[in-house]
């Protein structure tokens, strides 16, 4: 005989509470006494009524899944971003489906098809490989939120960092320290300069170039290294630098993983850091503090990015009628998040430059 699933009404009846009170407990809402909350939880347990089942009944139809699309989870930045998103989604009784694209357009399309096949109710895009118009077309099948990427579409919520300002400040810091031959690494295969606020990689590079230009220095294309993503890539880049006839005296590495590889290879070859060459990381990941020579790095509030993106997705899936929301987080260089100021135009998180060893 097929087992009959308990309903929210059953939980309310057994606990002696109203359906609305049960709903508040399921959704972790305030203004419910601990005594009432405990009775409801005990009733749910007795009936075998899971939070996920409850959430789905409250929402109506839906898979209860939110897909999260990242280039690779082996990168510590994206690992932390996914961790923050997943923890937040779980608070609202949603499951996450993690999809790694490895920078491939086809893999991203496969992730978007989860919406079309109704395997996911929404997709949080933490990197964008395809043309935006193609990705937006999937919005007819579910909700979309862009995280860690720029998006000019006013109809889609977005969480991103002000990359131009972060890399401008980082480059200015190096210049103020007396470095003049500054190399630049990027994970993208090629940097195409676009108007500010359209493309993250473009904004990062433009911030770097503008800082150099203001000091009367032209960026040396021989010191631009693209397609650099992992620690081993950093080792390879450092070996290339050591073979150059004219060597840079500083490098913005693009990520802490790349910077770590560069540091290890430099020390292996007797290169002194920062005396012979300064190396700057990006993202302020834990490994930045554990290297033999701790990294100076550009700090990004990855936990806040993930939390904001997940909450925005949940808000949309619940049908809260406030339109598209974007947020601006005020940050401090000591890594303490100050407050959240809501604006009408975007969820933006400004990277803060944080020094450690110079």
Image (spheres, rainbow, N blue to C red):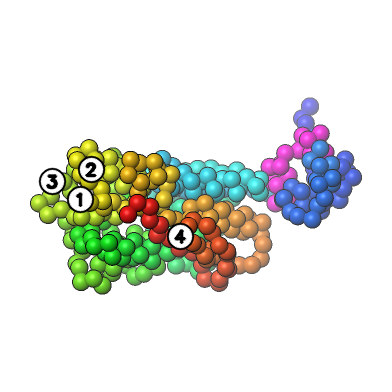
Residue to which mark 2 is pinned: 266
- Secondary structure beneath dot 1 equals loop
Farthest residue in the top direction?
1
Residue to which mark 1 is pinned: 276
Q: Earlier in the sequence, mark 4 or mark 3?
A: 3
Q: Quadrant of the C terminus?
A: bottom left
- Dot label at residue 111: none
- Quadrant of residue 209 within the rendered picture: bottom left
| Spatial separation of the CA atoms under disc 2 and disc 3 | 12 Å
Tell whether position 58 is magenta.
Answer: yes
- Asked if the residues shown at circle 2 and circle 1 are in contact, with their CB atoms under 8 angstroms apart, the answer is yes
- Asked if the residues shown at circle 4 and circle 1 are in contact, with their CB atoms under 8 angstroms apart, the answer is no
Residue to which mark 3 is pinned: 243
| Side of 220 where 284 appears, left or right | right
Q: Earlier in the sequence, mark 2 or mark 1?
A: 2
Q: Earlier in the sequence, mark 2 or mark 3?
A: 3
Q: Is residue 232 visible?
A: yes
Tell whether position 27 is magenta.
Answer: no
Residue to which mark 4 is pinned: 333
| Spatial separation of the CA atoms under disc 4 and disc 3 | 36 Å
- Secondary structure beneath dot 2 equals helix
Per the rendered image, the range of residues in magenta is 43-59
Q: Depth-wise, is mark 2 or mark 3 nearer the camera?
A: 2
Q: Is residue 118 visible?
A: no
Residue 175 coordinates in the image, percent (x, y) = 26, 64
């Amino acid at each position: 005989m097929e087992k009959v699933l308990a309903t929210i009404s059953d939980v309310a009846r057994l606990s002696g509470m109203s359906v609305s009170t049960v709903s508040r407990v399921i959704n972790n809402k305030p203004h419910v006494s601990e005594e009432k909350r405990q009775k409801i939880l005990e009733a749910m347990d007795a009936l075998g009524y899971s939070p996920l089942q409850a959430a789905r009944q409250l929402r109506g139809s839906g898979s209860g899944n939110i897909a999260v699309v990242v280039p690779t989870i082996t990168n510590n930045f994206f690992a932390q971003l996914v961790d923050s998103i997943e923890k937040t989604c779980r608070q609202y009784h949603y499951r996450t489906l993690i999809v790694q694209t490895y920078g491939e357009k086809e893999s991203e399309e496969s992730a978007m098809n989860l919406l079309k096949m109704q395997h996911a109710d929404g997709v949080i895009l933490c990197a964008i490989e395809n043309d935006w118009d193609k990705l937006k077309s999937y919005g007819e099948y579910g909700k979309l939120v862009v995280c860690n990427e720029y998006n000019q579409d006013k109809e889609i919520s977005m969480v991103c960092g002000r990359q131009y300002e972060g890399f401008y400040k980082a480059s200015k810091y190096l210049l103020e320290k007396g470095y003049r031959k500054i190399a630049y690494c990027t994970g993208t295969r090629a940097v195409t300069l676009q108007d500010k606020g359209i493309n993250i990689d473009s904004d990062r590079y433009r911030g770097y170039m503008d800082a150099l230009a203001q000091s009367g220095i032209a960026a040396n294309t021989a010191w631009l290294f693209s397609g650099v993503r992992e620690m081993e890539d950093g080792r390879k880049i450092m070996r290339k630098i050591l073979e150059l006839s004219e060597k840079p005296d500083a490098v913005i590495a693009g990520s802490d993983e790349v910077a770590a590889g560069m540091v290890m290879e430099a020390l292996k070859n007797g290169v002194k850091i920062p005396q012979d060459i300064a190396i700057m990381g990006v993202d302020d990941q834990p490994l930045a503090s554990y290297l033999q020579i701790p990294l100076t790095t550009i700090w990004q509030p990855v936990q806040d990015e993930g939390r904001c993106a997940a909450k925005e997705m949940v808000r949309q899936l619940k049908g809260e009628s406030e339109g598209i929301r974007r947020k601006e987080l005020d940050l401090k260089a000591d890594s303490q998040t100050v407050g959240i100021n809501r604006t009408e135009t975007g969820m933006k998180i400004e990277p803060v430059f944080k020094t450690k060893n110079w």
